[in-house]
């Protein structure tokens, strides 16, 4: 198969981890007889430095006409004081909107040999395998008005949490569809006891649930969900929720896996190119040291193969190789190890080579 992948290394540890994920994709291409071509663009802070904006039109166009986009992370203290319109993070929101990727899939399944890395008791981790479906192009991140203004001489700031019924419907329907190939349970998370937008969310989720009588369904308030994620994480299968709730709950869920550096994500939408990125940020505190955990990005590359290119065997090969590496205890410092980013990636590459050679 031929595919054209746009690579956006971004800022901080972004270039260090995407470099390794591209090596993995190249290895897969060579072993399975695919032709992947890669084009790299500056994005986020790197693009602000080069072009004065976090996302150029040229780069957005290239992403929209690609097979898929692989992203590291954007942002950092160097760009924290620029105008909000040109922040690195604003560029990321613009890219998600441009691609129409309304659903951000964030799988969380702790690896058995990493139970020590999680502060949670190991008995709580048994059987945990959840998929958080985070709405990605609506809600509090995009609602208008969004501004700071003077009201009677006093500074006021406003953000708006707005959803239309179709926006809720499409992401909830996707969550139910995905649940059919898993444990057949959907938890819809909201704050319907307080927020008008959540009352609409709950109503629409309930309507969509009627189309899936074979899938168990529950509503849960977001505060209670935050608690249950760490007291009974194994009780969840598919969790679907509003943009910001999903952002916060998945950083919390990373604690179950053992490190924020492990979790991948796939952002998909109405059938165009998907966007694949780890859930973590640019980690300015460890950038340039060569010790960032590349697993979240490498697993995002696996999701790219699965969701955008339909290459299930190749995706599984990468995931198995990650398991082998973690089982062997080749771990970066976030997981208590001494391995470098390169050591971990090299071990994953070797495991891929070995498994394909055995077939
Ligand atoms: P962060 O996720 O960058 O880092 C939080 C902590 O986790 C840090 O201690 C960091 O060292 C650690 N960490 C994160 N990824 C790691 C990895 N792969 N390996 C080892 N350790 C890792 O969050 P932050 O510090 O709050 O944000 C830093 C910047 O990143 C901010 O500018 C923020 O806006 C941005 N950000 C970008 C994205 C994205 O591009 N998708 C996501 C989150 C945050
Ligand atoms: C993430 C990040 C982003 C988000 C920021 C950087 C805009 O935290 O991808 O989880 O909130 O979506
Ligand atoms: Mn986040």
Image: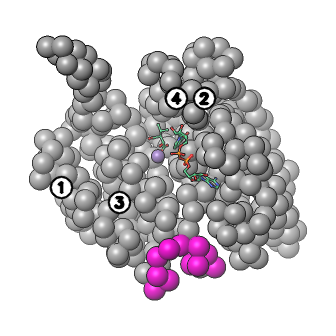
Q: Which mark is nearer the camera, 1 or 4?
A: 4
Q: CA distance from mark 1 to mark 2?
A: 45 Å
In the figure, 42 relative to 231: above or below?
above
Of pointers 3 and 1, the one earlier in the residue sequence: 1
User: On the rendered image, what quadrant is the C terminus found in?
Assistant: bottom right
> Label 3 belongs to which residue?
239
Please tell me whether mark 2 or mark 3 is closer to you in this view.
Answer: 2
Task: Classify mark 3: residues with Cα within 10 Å, few (<14), some (14-19) or many (20+).
Answer: many
Question: In the rendered image, which residue does mark 4 sit on?
Answer: 80
Q: How far across and how far down the image is residue 260, in percent? A: 55, 57
> In what element is the residue under mark 2?
helix
Q: Which residues make up the magenta segment?
A: 113-123
Tag in front: 3 or 4? 4
Q: Main secondary structure of the magenta part?
A: helix
Asked if disc 4 is less than 8 Å from ligand 1, the answer is yes
At a point 35% along the width and 44% down the height, the residue shown is 244
Q: Which residue is mark 2?
A: 78
Residue 15 visible within the image: yes
Name the secondary structure under disc 3. strand
Q: Is 270 colored magenta in this rendering? A: no
Q: Looking at the image, do the residues carrying marks 1 and 2 touch, with CB atoms under 8 Å apart? A: no
The nearer-to-camera label among 1 and 2 is 2
Of pointers 1 and 4, the one earlier in the residue sequence: 4
Distance in Å between CA atoms under marks 2 and 4: 6 Å
């Amino acid at each position: 198969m031929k595919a054209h992948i746009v690579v956006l290394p971004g800022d901080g540890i972004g270039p260090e981890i995407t470099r390794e994920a591209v090596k993995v994709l190249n290895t897969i291409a060579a072993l399975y007889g695919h032709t992947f071509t890669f084009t790299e663009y500056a994005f986020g802070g790197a693009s602000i430095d080069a072009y004065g904006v976090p996302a150029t039109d040229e780069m957005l166009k290239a992403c929209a006409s690609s097979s898929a986009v692989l992203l590291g992370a954007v942002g950092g203290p160097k760009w924290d004081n620029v105008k909000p319109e040109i922040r690195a993070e604003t560029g990321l929101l613009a890219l998600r909107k441009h691609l129409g990727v309304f659903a951000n899939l964030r799988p969380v399944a702790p690896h058995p040999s990493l139970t020590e890395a999680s502060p949670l008791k190991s008995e709580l981790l048994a059987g945990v395998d959840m998929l958080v479906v985070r709405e990605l192009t609506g809600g509090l991140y995009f609602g208008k008005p969004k501004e700071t203004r003077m009201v009677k001489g006093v500074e006021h700031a406003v953000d708006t949490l707005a959803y239309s019924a179709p926006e809720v419907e499409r992401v909830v329907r996707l969550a139910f569809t995905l649940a059919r190939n898993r444990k057949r349970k959907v938890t819809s998370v909201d704050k319907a006891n307080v927020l008008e937008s959540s009352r609409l969310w709950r109503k629409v989720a309930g309507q969509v649930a009627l189309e899936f009588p074979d899938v168990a369904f529950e509503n849960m308030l977001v505060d209670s969900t935050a608690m249950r994620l760490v007291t009974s994480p194994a009780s969840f299968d598919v969790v679907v929720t509003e943009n910001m709730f999903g952002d916060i709950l998945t950083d919390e869920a990373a604690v179950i896996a053992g490190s924020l550096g492990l979790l991948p994500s796939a952002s998909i939408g109405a059938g165009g190119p998907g966007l694949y990125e780890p859930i973590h940020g640019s980690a300015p505190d460890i950038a340039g040291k060569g010790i960032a955990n590349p697993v979240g990005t490498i697993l995002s590359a696996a999701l790219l193969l699965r969701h955008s290119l339909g290459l299930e065997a190749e995706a599984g090969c990468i995931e198995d190789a990650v398991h082998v590496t973690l089982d062997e205890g080749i771990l970066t410092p976030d997981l208590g190890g001494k391995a470098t980013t390169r050591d971990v990636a090299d071990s994953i590459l070797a495991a891929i080579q070995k498994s394909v050679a055995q077939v």
